[in-house]
Amino acid sequence: MSAKENATDDFVEDQTVGRRRIRLPRVLRELFDERLPEGVGWAHVFGSTLVVLIVVQFVTGVLLSLNYAASTSTAWESVRYIQNRVVWGAVIRGVHHWAASASIVVAGLHLIRVFVFAAYRSPRRLTWVAGVLLLFVLLGFGLTGYLLPWDLKAYFGTKVATEIPGSLPVIGPFLLQIIRGGVNVGPFTLTRFYSVHVILLPAAMVLLLTVHLYLVRRHGITPPWVRRGEAGRKLDSFFPLQAFKDSVAVLLAVLIVIGLALWLGAPLEDKADPTNSSYVPRPDWYFLGLQHLLRIFQGRWQILATAVIPGTGAMLLLVWPWLDRNNERRLQRRPIALAFGIVCVVGVVGMTVAGYSAVQKGEKRMASLAKMASTSSVAPESKEAVRDVDEASAADLLQKGKQLYGVLRCDLCHGPNRREVIPGLPPDLSYAGSKLREDWMRSYLANPRAIRYKSDGVRPEIRMPDYRLSPAEAKALSRYLSTRTDSDRFGDGIDDAESNADRIARGRRLFANYQCRGCHVLASQGNRIGPDLTHVSSRLKRAYLDRFLAAPEAVIPGTSMKNFELWDQERVALVAFLESQR
Amino acid sequence: MDELPPCRRRFLARVVVVLNAFVAMVVATPAVGYLLSPILKRRSSQWVAIGKASQFASHDPRPVAFQYNDEDGYSVGRTHRVAYVRRSDEAIGDEGIIVLSPVCTHMGCNVVFNEATNQFECPCHGGRYNVSGSVVGGPPPRPLARFPTRVRDGNLEIQVS
């Protein structure tokens, strides 16, 4: 108890010495004049930094809640509104996002410092317990806050995170429903998490922080590197030297957080879409370790990852001051504590890193798919970003398409060495990129349908099978096919041909004169012998059409299309006319 | 290590004040901007048809309910409102029709038209207005607001914001 008595003595001493030059309110004066033991310095700045970060979180959190609406139909929309329309909204959101991560980091450093200095010994056991509980509260903030933007990341991250208590034996399914407010992550999960995030946890935080800070002040700072019971020399007051060090640390932390907020901002992905199957669920980084445990312990061992290891870790952390009976404060004389500390730090950091790289790997695997699947529902603001991502993964996409082409054995029917050549069917795709438009291939592959009519000479049972490709797979395959070109045959097209009204009119006359409707349908008129030409130019490229019209037999051996021996200008006009019908 | 010399104490004290003031400013600047954001919001107005102009022949105020799509930020909703429409001999508005807002100019309660007294009466603090919206009693500082009106294709339209 000597520390406490000393502290009181110091305070009285201060009063009598009257050393103060700055007039301050009594409360502040008491805080500022706390006499610190020798050895207190830069290692002791994390507590103050954490308090400031928590205040920053409170301020930015209140601001965000002014515009946020916790319902599945408005949460994402309101966050996007904050992000894009509210003055400084993106920055406030970014600060809230990064300060959350920063506070976990600083809390970890604070915990390590207290552990290393053995500052959790009696009489400061309860200070330690309150501190560890505060860490859990911080993690709770992280977990609940993660869902609130209601984007893909939020939805799937929370889905996976809530599966963890859900997988507990016996009580799991009930627990899951209570946490989620239903069987699935849905509107009630959102309101629950919001309520916990803005009411329950802040209340717990204020309570625990009050207790923690009161105890810190009451018992004073542990004199570093002395045996328990030894008082250590009391030196200068908190203000101004230690206050200066704390202020520098606070400044650094706030600048880093604001810098990250301005530079990277807070991510907002597409709105939560439970049907998205290509998304790799990823919790926030400080839960990656826990998630990785689930990869290691599976089946009957899963309970180790869901309950035993995290539960034991948390309990050990909480009761550590009672377990550690060593009176020594120097770390080298505390082998058990040192071992425990190293195991904890290495375990947590190692698991987090392993979890991170596992997620990276999974994302890489899904990258091309996930990014594409989301392209269609992307908010207009993030179109740019998506385009960048698409370019980055272009190589992956191509690779994926090539794989698909091999796996589906497309060459059997579409390769240059087709086993049996049936006139006009199936098409040779060795030059698909010169013939077909990529966007058409993409929609066709996703949903193949008949292009040609059943007629004599065509075996009607041979049709393009529907492989039920996902939009992402169709995109990959069509991208790959579009790289298969034959510029020798189709390169010198008629790209310069401007489609002007004269040309189209001429094409229309030619179309009638050559009686194309004798075999082709155009705009619902004509005979169904050859392919429907109504939207032919959204399927076939201009150069291919031109080459085909010039010499049908050369392009498709055995085709029933007649060679009309058209002049160049006639072909240009016909193609222009067909394009105008698109 | 002994106590710091006084001049160094004073210097450090000032540095501490400056550093913390800077941190406070860095956090407060975006916070204040964010708080003031609604002031900078673009205000939009639109014309809403509330009925055929020909049907408003009476000189007695008639309550007309109308609704319009109201877009604000991410929220798109349908707003329902009421206005009092009457024909007036004053040469105001299109075809002598005036459209009064029922919102009392005192504290924003909705006024009701009392046919017995031929006055608009406010239930909250007893404000009274005549059929033209002018204050005839009670605390209201201004006459009832009038919606800008116009007639398009025979429809009476009012401008709401």
Image (tube, coloured by chain):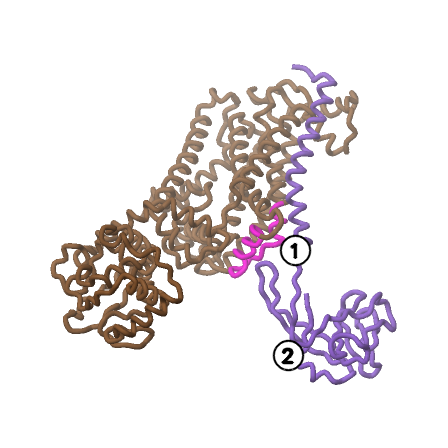
Mark positioned earlier in the residue sequence (2 or 1): 1
A202 w.r.t. B130: above or below: above
Q: Which residue carries the number 1 mark?
A: B41
Q: Which residue carries the number 2 mark?
A: B153
- Which image quarter holds the N terminus of chain A? top right
Residue A278, given in percent of the width and then of the height, sits at: 36, 53
Total marks shown come to: 2
Q: Give the image quarter of residue A515.
A: bottom left
Camera-side mark, 2 or 1? 2
Tell which chain the image draws in purple: B
Tell which chain the image draws in brown: A
Instruction: Give A378 or B44, whichever is nearer the viewer.
Output: B44
Residues in magenta, as a range: A60-84
* Left or right: A300 as drawn, with respect to B151: left
Residue situated furthest top in the rendering: B1
The reply to whether residue B55 is in sight is yes
B54 w.r.t. A316: above or below: below
* Left or right: A11 as drawn, with respect to A72: right
- Which image quarter holds the C terminus of chain A? bottom left
Residue A510, given in percent of the width and then of the height, sits at: 29, 71
Instruction: Give B86 or A408, whichever is nearer the viewer.
Output: B86
